[in-house]
């Protein structure tokens, strides 16, 4: 029977992405995403629950994440869960990560810029052509 390993997560970055290069020169980036949900318990009190996900991206996607994402950015990612074993201070440990293959930045442009100020909205450039009523009837088809 076939199986599916797919993760779809939307949330905010917990810290700035950390970009590194693997021994073969391939880029890899790590960051965490917090996905929160809220509900009312049986006493009518609002309860908020947050799940944290460790995210990993490779190659060009890693470069894009490192360049455009920052702590607090709202992001949508798709990928697969992967658990790996590593050793720290002589103790074997396990970590589950989401290896992403797709990332979409959500929120406004001001959320993605590093400046604390918001850029003014740009107005569309006015066309040198007049309105439809002002156009000549000499259009050749």
Image: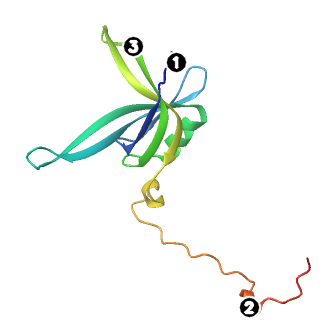
- Report x, y in % for residue 50: 26, 39
Q: CA distance from mark 2 to mark 1?
A: 62 Å
Outermost residue on the front side: it is: 1
Circles 3 and 1, Cβ within 8 Å, touching? The answer is: no
Which quadrant of the view contains residue 101?
Answer: top right
Of circles 2 and 1, the one toward us is 1
**Number of the label disc, if any, that sits on residue 10:** none
Which residue is identified by label 1?
Answer: 2
- Report x, y in % for residue 82: 44, 21
Q: CA distance from mark 3 to mark 1?
A: 25 Å
- Report x, y in % for residue 105: 49, 49
Left or right: residue 2 versus residue 13 is right
- Residue at the (47%, 67%) spot, across then down: 119
Which residue is identified by label 2?
Answer: 133
Q: Nearer the viewer, residue 133 or 56?
A: 133
Outermost residue on the bottom side: it is: 134
The crowding category of the residue bearing disc 3, from other C-alpha atoms within 10 Å (few below 14, some 14 to 19, many at least 20), is: few
Circles 2 and 3, Cβ within 8 Å, touching? The answer is: no
Q: Is residue 72 above or below residue 137?
A: above
Q: Secondary structure at mark 1?
A: loop
- Residue at the (49%, 20%) spot, across then down: 3
């Amino acid at each position: 029977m076939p199986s599916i390993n797919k993760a779809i997560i939307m949330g905010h970055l917990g810290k700035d992405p950390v970009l590194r290069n693997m021994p073969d020169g391939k880029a890899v980036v790590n960051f965490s995403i917090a996905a929160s949900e809220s509900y009312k318990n049986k006493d009518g009190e609002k309860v908020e629950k947050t799940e944290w996900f460790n995210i990993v991206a490779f190659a060009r996607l890693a470069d894009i994440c490192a360049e455009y994402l920052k702590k607090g950015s709202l992001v949508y990612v798709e990928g697969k869960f992967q658990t790996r074993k590593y050793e720290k201070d002589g103790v074997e440990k396990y970590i589950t990560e989401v290896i992403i293959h797709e990332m979409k930045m959500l929120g406004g442009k001001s959320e993605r810029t590093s400046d604390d100020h918001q850029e003014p909205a740009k107005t569309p450039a006015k066309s040198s052509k007049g309105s439809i009523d002002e156009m000549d009837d000499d259009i050749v088809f």
